[in-house]
Image (tube, helix red, strand yellow):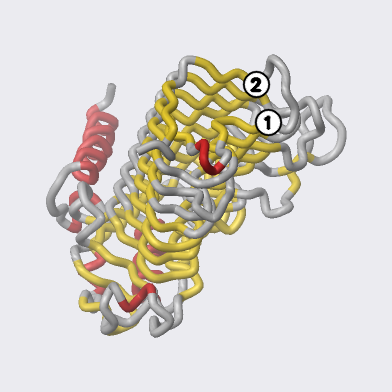
């Protein structure tokens, strides 16, 4: 290996290590420092234009944009039209340092969830046909959408972020090979919503007609979802894997999946959700022809005090395997663990520990 190539690889390794470490990176070592633009960190002055400039400059140079702790008011969305970018807090282990907020600092956090709250901005970040985007350690606050995918967000990671009082924490059409980890979604409608938006893409060789642009390989783990009025996670396409997440007091329900081939819900804790009467977990076909839908595996979860006629609802053509869960079911409400639109060997429920929550 030449001396030049050794230096180049060493520089890239140093940059990656610096971004993922705790602490502050200098401007020259590992990226563009937003402090160089002298932004207002109190949230009293709109910084959307200079943040847009910083994103564009970072995309043309180091591909890394670093934000110092503070509150940044964005009166309009910042658009990301670039690939292979990292946007990160300088303190990556917690989102409670950098706030990108859709309101001018003034109202208390408690006021934001009342009718007296200021109007929400349309979105905080908009990714336009973006791939290899990494966002780390940032809180998105008081916006219609926290991170919006204008068309697909692909091959990307959202790590240690928080979404507070956003109607949609993450909304994309669709998500393709995306990991969302260590993040929280609190107050809003949907935590993560990924539908195809009616888009079609070129057919694969040997197939007929256009195919829908569904999500695929969405991995959600170590996240918390609280106080959401619709489904906390709603995704069309698969595989979708939800692991080791907390769903609490989300009245609309926890997880709704459409047109899956295979998906897994594993090691999660559910408490006090689906109180509107929806199933806690739902899987059903949407556009796939009957007989083409796949399998949902639900195992190793704990489900307590949730509403709905059925904890899990299965539409026609879907296969289900529910096993090794601990579940509270209310007999006084006529609640059942599984309700399937068609019975058969493709619906399996076994080795679950159930208790009657209507008995003290």
Give the residue displayed 45% in from the left and 57% down from the top: 228
SS type, badge 2: strand
Q: Quadrant of the N terminus?
A: top left
Residue 135 % position (x, y):
36, 51
Residue 144 % position (x, y):
49, 69
**Residue situated furthest left in the rendering:** 23
The answer to whether residue 103 is above or below residue 262 is below
Which residue is under mark 1?
340
- Given residues 342 and 14, the one toward you in this image is 342
- Given residues 214 and 192, the one toward you in this image is 192
Give the residue displayed 54% in from the left and 24% down from the top: 297
Badge 1 or badge 2: first in the primary sequence: 1
Q: Toward which corner of the image does residue 187 lie, by quadrant?
A: bottom left
SS type, badge 1: strand
Residue 26 % position (x, y):
15, 55
Alpha-carbon span between mark 1 and mark 2: 8 Å
Question: Does the CB distance between marks 1 and 2 fall below 8 Å?
Answer: yes
> Crowding near pointer 2: few (<14 within 10 Å), some, many (20+)?
some
In the image, taking residue 154 as reference, residue 42 lies left or right, namely left
Which residue is under mark 2?
347
């Amino acid at each position: 290996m030449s001396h030049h190539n050794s230096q180049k690889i060493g520089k890239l390794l140093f940059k990656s290590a610096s971004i993922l470490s705790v602490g502050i990176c200098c401007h020259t070592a590992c990226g563009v420092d937003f402090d160089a633009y002298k932004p207002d960190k109190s949230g009293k002055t709109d910084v959307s234009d200079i943040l847009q400039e910083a994103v564009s400059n970072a995309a043309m140079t180091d591909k890394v944009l670093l934000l110092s702790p503070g509150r940044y008011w964005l009166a309009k969305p910042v658009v990301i039209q670039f690939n292979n970018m990292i946007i990160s807090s300088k303190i990556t282990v917690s989102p409670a340092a950098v706030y990108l907020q859709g309101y001018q600092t003034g109202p208390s956090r408690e006021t934001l969830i009342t009718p007296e709250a200021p109007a929400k901005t349309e979105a905080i970040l908009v990714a336009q046909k973006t791939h290899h985007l990494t966002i780390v350690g940032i809180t998105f606050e008081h916006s219609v959408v926290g991170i919006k995918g204008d068309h697909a967000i692909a091959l990307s990671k959202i790590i240690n972020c928080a979404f507070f009082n956003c109607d949609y924490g993450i909304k994309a059409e669709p998500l393709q090979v995306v990991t969302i980890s260590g993040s929280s979604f609190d107050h809003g409608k949907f935590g993560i919503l990924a539908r195809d938006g009616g888009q079609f893409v070129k057919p694969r060789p040997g197939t007929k007609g256009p195919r829908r642009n569904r999500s695929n390989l969405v991995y959600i783990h170590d996240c918390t979802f609280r106080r959401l009025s619709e489904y906390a996670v709603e995704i069309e396409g698969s595989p979708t894997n939800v692991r080791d997440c907390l769903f609490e007091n989300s009245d609309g329900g926890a997880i709704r999946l459409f047109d899956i081939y295979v998906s897994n819900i594993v090691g999660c804790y559910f408490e006090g959700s689906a109180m509107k009467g929806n199933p806690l977990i739902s899987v059903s076909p949407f556009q796939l022809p009957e007989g083409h839908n796949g399998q949902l595996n639900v195992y190793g979860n704990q489900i307590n005090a949730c509403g709905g006629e059925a904890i899990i609802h299965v539409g026609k053509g879907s296969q289900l395997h529910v096993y090794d869960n601990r579940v509270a079911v209310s007999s006084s409400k006529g609640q059942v663990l599984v309700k399937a639109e068609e019975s058969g060997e493709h619906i399996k429920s076994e080795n679950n520990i159930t208790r009657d929550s209507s008995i003290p």
